[in-house]
Every structure is written in structure tokens, then in C-alpha cells.
Amino acid sequence: MKKTLLALFAIVSISFSMSAQRVADNALGVRIGDNDGFSTELNYQRALNEDNRLEFGLAWRSNDDISAFKLTGLYQWVWLIDGGFNWYAGVGGGVGQVDFDDDFPGDPDSETFLFAAGDIGIEYNFDIPLLLSLDFRPEFGFGDYRDDLDFDIALGIRYQF
């Protein structure tokens, strides 16, 4: 009986140690996509523990007709796939401001909007302090400018420290 319990304890311990991983304490970089995610986003990740982290982003867009920025915050769960591969999922939201250059009198030229966001993706941690990710982020906007569901797919390139 003691041998059986000892073997069971060893198997459980090994399985927990195999699923343990190390999320970098900090990662800073860019997230490059296209849609209403505003194409380019400065991005920062902060680990809370080995399996969870916070992600913050500042995205912007500027052209002749529009100038906009967006702040995003996400809570993410991270799971090990194999070696340096991880997959992650998260929830969060944010706030943004858009300024229009329209020539219509009576129309507002700027608007603040809120949005809720989800996030699911895959990432690879290299042996050097480089993290590459590909993720899908649906965003549901609240406001006249963003009052629908937008899908953003992006590539992330981050330096880990």
C-alpha cells in the first residue's frame, strides 16, 4: 500500500512539474495587425505568477481624415504546449479617443469610446529574450464610432526581461 501511494504521489508531482512554466516577468514590444485594432500597438506584459499576466497596449492611427488612440488592458492565462510554445487566452477592455477631420457643421469632431475585448493566441519563447506571438482579439465597442464587433489578428514581437 505504501508503495502504491508513493508511486501515485510521484506521478502527480511529475505531472504538475511538467505543466509548470515560466512566464517572463516583463515583456515590451509591438503588436502589428490590421482592422480596427489601429494597426500598430506598443505593448507591455507583466507577469502576476507563472501562469498569469497582465497585458497593456497603446494603439494609434493617424491619416488625413482621422486621428485616434486606444488603451487596452487584458488579464491572460498562459498554458504550456511544448518546449517554448505556449497558448494563452484573456479578457479585458479599454478606452479610446478618435478625432475626425470632417467639414460638416454640427457634427462632433471627436468621440471617446469604450470596448470589451477577448484574446486568444499562441506564442514562442526563444532561448534569447525574444517572444513572438500570433493572436486573435475580438472587440465589442460601445459608442457611435465603435458600436459593433471588430476582429483583430496581430503578430507580436516583444523583448523579455
Image: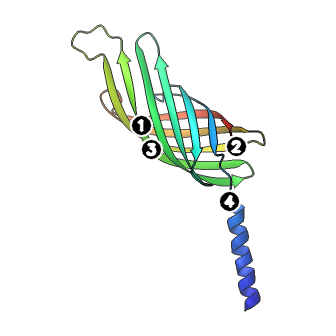
Single out the mark in the foreground, 2 or 4: 4
Crowding at mark 1 (Cα within 10 Å: few <14, some 14-19, many 20+): some
- Label 2, residues with CA under 10 Å away: few <14, some 14-19, many ≥20: some
Indicate the secondary structure of the residue bearing disc 1.
Answer: strand
> Considering the image in quadrants, where does the C terminus appear?
top right
First reached walking from the N terminus: tag 1 or tag 4: 4
The mark that comes first in sequence, 3 or 4, is: 4
The residue under label 1 is 94
Which of the 4 quarters of the picture holds residue 154? top right
Name the amino acid, label 4: Ala
Q: Residue furthest left?
A: 106
Amino acid carrying label 1: it is Gly
Q: CA distance from mark 3 to mark 4?
A: 25 Å
The residue pinned by badge 4 equals: 20
Q: Is label 3 in a helix, a strand or a loop?
A: strand
User: x, y (%) of residue 37?
Assistant: 48, 30
What's the residue at 38%, 22% (across, down)?
98
Cα separation, mark 2 vs mark 4, equals: 16 Å
Image position of 104 (left or right of 33): left
C-beta proximity under 8 Å, tags 3 and 4: no
Q: Residue at x 68, y 55 (%)?
A: 21
Q: At x 26% / y 9%, what residue is drawn?
A: 104
Circle on res. 92: 3
On the image, the x and y values in percent for residue 30 come to: 60, 30
Give the alpha-carbon distance from disc 2 to disc 1, as whole Å: 26 Å
Q: Which residue is mark 2?
A: 124
Q: Are marks 1 and 3 in contact (CB under 8 Å)?
A: yes
Identify the mark nearer the N-term, 2 or 3.
Answer: 3
Of badges 2 and 1, the one in the foreground is 1
Mark 2 or mark 4, which has the lower sequence index?
4
Taking depth in this image into account, of 116 and 94 the one nearest to the observer is: 94
Residue occupying the point 40% across, 12% down: 65
